[in-house]
Image (cartoon, rainbow, N blue to C red):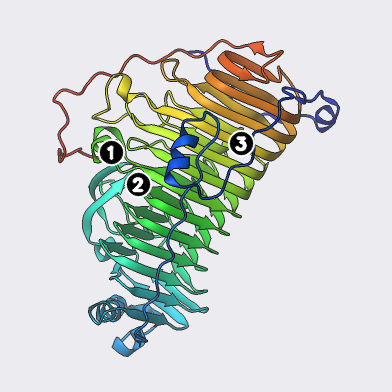
Amino acid sequence: MRKPDLTRSTPNRRAFLTASSVAGLAASAAPAALAQAPDVASRATRQSAPGVPATPILPTPTPRPTNGLKLDPRAFGAKGDGVTKDTVAFQTALDRVAVLGGGEVIVSAGVYLIGALRIGSNTVLHVEEGATLQGSPDVADYPVTQVRWEGKWTPGYIGLISAHGKKNIILSGKGRILASDAIERRIEQSTGLRHPCLLEFVDVQGLTVTDLYTRQNDQWSIHPVYCDDVIFRGMTVNGKADGIDVDSCRRVVIDRCNFDTVDDCISLKSGRGMEGNVIARPTEDVTITDCVFVDHRWACIGIGSETSAGVRRVLVERCRCDAAHTFAIYIKSRPGRGAFIEDIAMRDLEVKETGYGFLRINILEGGKQDQFPVPGLDGIPTIRNFLFERIKVVDVPVLVEAVQIHPDKPLDGFVLRDVTGTAGRGMTLVNMKNVELSNINVSVYSGPKLAIDNVTGIGLDGAARLVPPDVPAPIAASDPAYHLGVVPGRPN
């Protein structure tokens, strides 16, 4: 299979400044700005208009308990000395708040060594400045339960702080929540069990996490699954793997957060293979605003590769991508996932220090193939309505690499406009329709500014011809056939 070279390039600065620009790819007028919060009827209309993504629905704010109950874990025996395990004292305070109808657990200054904690409904866990919740180094302090890992439900260790099937939960304060660095690797080698996330919420209705500093080990940091009405605001998210993995959730806001992670800063997922496709709980209505990203291994924002229930209505605005090991924005899936990725809008982004470039779209081989893939044409993801505008790039090796798109389901609606800066190479596009390229003023160091194959739309004049990559063989149904509840075996 012939693929574009994605080797990191280091263009000469003077050559950048004297290179010809990609300006004038199209002179067509830009469509009107997206309306805010359209109703259901207008959303349906917008979804049918290629290149005009629908606007996400915002979450309902999480209500705070009003009964005035406030408990201190020290009243139940917590020491806060960083040596004594305070798990029982914390769990007692949390449980007592929950059974009394809700309230607040206030954590004062100190270092509290804890194992896994579960939070009940109508509960605020407030970690004050100077207080640290330090995760235990002993995996025995994290019970084994069903966890979602890379899009599949499988046995694994529960998160350090978690909730399951609850409502109206708030984590707040200027304190810190830290994982133990003694727990290494994402999977326990001897058992295949997934190691604990830092914060993990399953089927929570109404969740707000604000202002906290978090640091995770080699596992994902923050993982909401099947959650509705979720807000992450003002957080500092550090870790050796993903930052926030939004997994089959609805109405999510990530606002004014700072990320420094080894893997994706933010990843949007919805399940993998037939299991995710049959459960059919998409990630939808996600708004990401005013965040700063530093990534050391993958991307600042990743969509996929686990997309088997779909991802739709995603808006990213006013964010800074200060570093990315690969691409700042990486949209990925593959035949065998099925479902859709649609209505993606990103605007007012600043991008620099990327290893490979600004944007990659890979719908042919993103992620691992599932043991039970979605077969045939249904297994090829539907992708439509991608909009990127008002983007500033600084010395990115590649502006856009979007060649791995299946010809049987081209990307329908791709808008790139109002882009400025410098790039080692330009844009490569394959299998797209309803494309609009306009006002792209990017100085390109080498190669054609635009190369295409099987692409139709506006702003394509003068494009070079591109040899597309080979298309993978059709995905056959698994034998035996999948049924809900089948044991998937160890994660592949």
Question: Residue under circle 1?
Answer: 276
Quarter containing the C terminus: top left
Can you tell which quarter of the image residue 6 is in?
top right
- 58 lies above or below 66: above
User: Which of pointers 3 and 2 lies earlier in the amino acid sequence?
Assistant: 2
Q: Who's the residue at 32% across and 63% down the image? A: 162
- Is 461 positioned to the left or the right of 188 in the image? right
x and y percentages locating residue 187 in the rendered image: 32, 47
Q: Amino acid at mark 3?
A: Phe
Question: Residue under circle 2?
Answer: 248
Q: Who's the residue at 58% across and 33% down the image? A: 359
Real-space CA distance between mark 3 and mark 2, rounded to the nearest whole angstrom: 24 Å
- 66 lies above or below 230: below
Q: Nearer the viewer, residue 445 or 461?
A: 461
Can you tell which quarter of the image residue 111 is in?
bottom left
Real-space CA distance between mark 1 and mark 2, rounded to the nearest whole angstrom: 9 Å
Contact (Cβ within 8 Å) of mark 1 with mark 2? yes
Q: Who's the residue at 68% across and 28% down the image? A: 9
Task: Give neighbour class at mark 2: few <14, some 14-19, many 20+ (Cα, 10 Å).
Answer: many
Task: Give neighbour class at mark 3: few <14, some 14-19, many 20+ (Cα, 10 Å).
Answer: many
Work out whether residue 7 can be spotted.
no
Question: What number is the disc on residue 388?
Answer: 3
User: Which of pointers 1 and 3 lies earlier in the amino acid sequence?
Assistant: 1
Counting every numbered tag in the picture gives 3
Dot 3: element: strand
Q: Who's the residue at 31% across and 23% down the image? A: 378
Q: Amino acid at mark 1?
A: Gly
